Amino acid sequence: MPDVNALVAHADDAFDAVRAMNHGTIWESQYVAPPTPYRLLGNLSTAGGHGLAQLLGQLADRLDESAARDDLYDAEGGDPGLAAATAVALLRDSAERARAVGVLLDRAQSAVASVGVRD
């Protein structure tokens, strides 16, 4: 069984990393020249595109399995099976969209692969 606290901590770390990158690129004075975008795009493609797609698909699978196996309840009195099925469908859709983001980030990385700054 996975360490749930470790999984949540990794998600917290990912949030903090994206937030730090947003803060590091928000102002024009925070100059980011090649090859930095190439390296960022490669890592983001793997983590935020393809890796995120895999994670979302796996979360959908685990939630679907739990809905079929476990006695779920909804704290607000709704239908827990419907809630789980809705979440699974949304996770699968999100996974497909993350795959598409990964492909676009791969293309962006390829586009800047040979770009440099003259001295």
Image (tube, grey):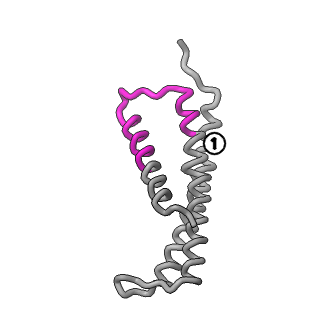
Query: Which secondary structure lies at badge 1?
Result: helix
Q: Which residue is at the far top?
A: 119
Tell me the residue that label 1 is attached to. 107
Name the residue located 36 percent from the left edge and 82 percent from the top edge: 75
Image quadrant occupied by the N terminus: bottom right
Height in image: 69 above or below 11? below
The image shows residue 52 at horizontal and vertical percentages of 56, 55
* 94 and 74: which is toward the camera: 74
Identify which residue, 28 or 63, lies in the foreground.
63
Give coordinates of residue 43: x percent, y percent: 57, 41
Q: Is residue 80 left or right of residue 52?
A: left
Relative vertical location of residue 72 with respect to residue 48 in this rendering, above or below: below
| Amino acid of disc 1 | Arg
Please tell me in which quadrant of the rendered image residue 27 appears.
Answer: top left
Where does the magenta region start and end? 15-41
Which residue is rendered at x = 56% and y = 27% of the image? 35
